[in-house]
Image (cartoon, grey):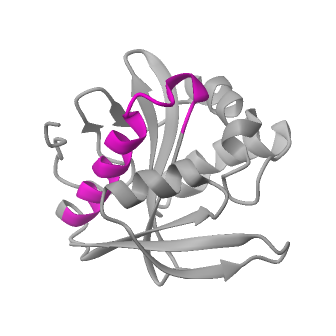
Amino acid sequence: MAAPRFPAYRPGMPPTLRTPRLLLDAYTPADEEDFVALFQDTRVSRWMGDGPASEAEDRALFGRIFSKVYARDLFDVWAVRRGALLVGHAEIKRTEAVGGHEIVYALSPGVWGGGLGTELAEALVSYGFRTLALTEVHATVDVRNTASLRLLGRIGFEHVRDVVEDDGGLTRVLIRRL
């Protein structure tokens, strides 16, 4: 796989990243319906944050990407596109829960199984190391999300510890070092 291209970092909107098959760029207001559809799909949202949310909550989350994340340059959040289609969501952000930067990603079930998850995760890790000058990157994954655990293991993430959630669920904390 060819290495992703990384432009110079600029405040505000995230830089555009390209992999062989994906484009990661800033969301636009026109992406709202596709964003909501992605997060309303329970095959995706069951693994995101606190799990499935209402449509109104997902629309509010989309709005906060513009009003808070981009406006205050809090962290990098991308729309993940394949051709003209929005097929996923990606982030890299400092998280106190792991004491460092964490990657977050989701892909539409229609593109699962073709290696795009690996391509996306590798691009986020490379961006963290090359552009943000990190020496380690974390991921947190529900222990039942075996597909993501396998994917991250294949690209060099190691299990650090487990966190017992308030609902009794178990989250794996993973790390990849430079």
Q: Is residue 94 magenta?
A: no
Q: Residue 111: give x, y in percent of width and height.
A: 50, 25
Magenta region, main secondary structure: helix
Residue at image position (32%, 40%) is 119
On the rendered image, what quadrant is the N terminus found in?
Answer: top left
State the residue in front, 67 or 53.
53
Classify residue 52 as left or right of residue 32: right
Classify residue 26 as left or right of residue 11: right
Classify residue 75 as left or right of residue 36: left
Residue 71 appears in the picture as rendered: no
Residue at image position (45%, 65%) is 93
Residue 82 appears in the picture as rendered: yes
State the residue in front, 34 or 46.
46
Instruction: Tell me the magenta residue range.
Output: 107-129
Q: Residue 142: give x, y in percent of width and height.
A: 65, 62
Q: Residue 46: give x, y in percent of width and height.
A: 73, 48
On the rendered image, what quadrant is the C terminus found in?
Answer: bottom left
* Picture quadrant of residue 138: bottom left
Q: Is residue 159 above or below residue 85?
A: below
* Picture quadrant of residue 76: bottom left
Q: Residue 56: give x, y in percent of width and height.
A: 84, 40
From this viewpoint, which residue is outermost toward the top?
84
Q: Is residue 141 above or below residue 65?
A: below
Residue at image position (82%, 47%) is 53
